[in-house]
Image: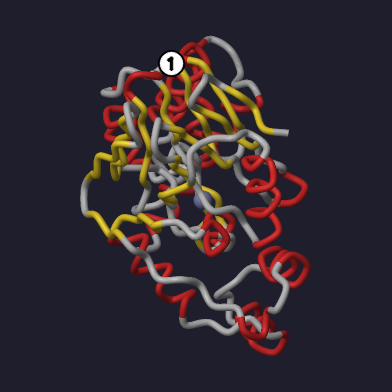
Amino acid sequence: MLNKLSKSIYYLSNQNDKERPTLGLVCGDKYSLVIDGGNSVQHANDFLREIESLNVPPIKYLVITHAHWDHFLGMNEYNATIIVNSLTNEIINKWRGYSYDDRSLEEYKNSKKMDSLCVDIIKNEIPDRESFQLNASDIIFEESLKLDLGNKVCILERIRSTHTDDSTVAYIPDEKTIFLGDSVYCTTTNSLFHFKQSKLLPMIEDIQKYDAVHFLLGHESICDLDEMNSYWNELVSASKAADSTSLESALESFEADHKRKPNEDELFFLKAFVNDQILKSQL
Ligand SMILES: [Zn+2]
C-alpha cells in the first residue's frame, strides 16, 4: 500500500526484513518523479503496480539518492530519465560493469564487492540475471538541479552527509517536504559502524536550510520536525562527548554533561562516533 502525504506526494514504506528502502513519488500536473529505484526488479515492480492504480501523470524522472545497491538496483524498470549526482554516477558505473550470473555473484561476495544480503536479494528478486545490466544515467549534475513537474517544483541537491559522500536530497518547497535518502544515518567501514563525525554539523546545516516539516528517511519512512530536532540534539551531544577513541571517556563525559546515563539510542550514537575516531586514528 502506498502512503499518501498530500495530493502530490506518495511513498512506499521501507521494509526492513527485505532490505527495502522507502521509495517516493512526486506528481506535478504534467509529470511524476520517482525517488529511489528500489533494491531489485521485484521491488520496483511492486511500487509501479501501486502507482498504476493512482491515475497520476507519467513518470518522467527517477532520482537515485546515493549509490547503495538497495536504492538503485530496480532503476531499469521505470523507463524514466535517470538523474544522479556525478559521484553517485561514478560508483554506479562499477555496478554497470558487473555480471549477475551465479559465478560472478559468488566472486563479488568473496571479494567483498557485494555483501551476502545483496547477493541473496539479486538471486531472489532479479529475473533473467544472466543478461541483466543496469541502464546508463541520463542526467548527471554536480551540486543541484531544479525540476518542474508542472506546477510542482522539486529541488535535487547534493548535501554533506554522515552516511556517504554522494548524498542527494529531494526537496519540494510548496509541500515543505524533503526526501533525505539515507543521508542522516551512519555507515560501515571495515566492519565498524560509524557516523562521519566531521560531516555532522555541516549536514545539519545543509538540511536545516530547507523549510521542511515532513522528512522522509530511507529506512524509517516519515519524521516530523520535532522528531528530526530531537534526532539532531542526540547526535550532536553524542558527538561532543565522543572526542577520543575511548568509549569509557565518552560515557563519562556524556554522564557529566547530562547527569544521567545515555538511553539506548544515545549509547548507539556514542559508540558510532567513537568508532569514527578509531577509524580516523588508523589512517
Ligand atoms: Zn545507504
Residue 93 found in image quarter:
bottom left
The residue lying at 67 percent from left, 85 percent from top is 130
- Location of residue 55 in the rendering, given as x and y in whole percent from the top left corner: 59, 35
Q: Quadrant of the N terminus?
A: top right
Q: Is residue 155 left or right of residue 38?
A: left
Check the image and tell me how it is coloured.
secondary structure
Q: Secondary structure at mark 1?
A: loop
Q: Which residue is painted at 54% across and 78% down in the image?
A: 133
Give neighbour class at mark 1: few <14, some 14-19, many 20+ (Cα, 10 Å). Answer: some
* Residue plotted at (41% across, 49% down): 61
Q: Using residue 23 as the reference point, say whether residue 27 is left or right of it.
A: left
Q: Most extreme residue toward the bottom, as rendered? A: 103
Horizontal side of residue 145 vs 6, given as left or right: left
Which residue sits furthest left? 143
Q: Is residue 114 above or below residue 140?
A: below
Q: Quadrant of residue 2?
A: top right
Q: From the viewer's side, name the closer residue of 134 and 153.
A: 153
Residue 192 pos. (x, y %): 55, 55
- Residue 150 left/right relative to 142: right
Residue 113 visible in rendering: yes
> How many numbered discs?
1
| Residue 180 at x, y percent in the picture | 44, 36
Residue under pointer 1:
213
Q: Amino acid at mark 1?
A: Val
Any part of residue 274 in sight: no
Within 8 Å: ligand 1 and the Cβ of disc 1? no
Q: Classify 133 as above or below 280.
A: below
Front residue of 183/282: it is: 183
Image quarter where the C terminus lies is bottom left
- Going 21% across and 47% down the picture, which residue do you hit? 143
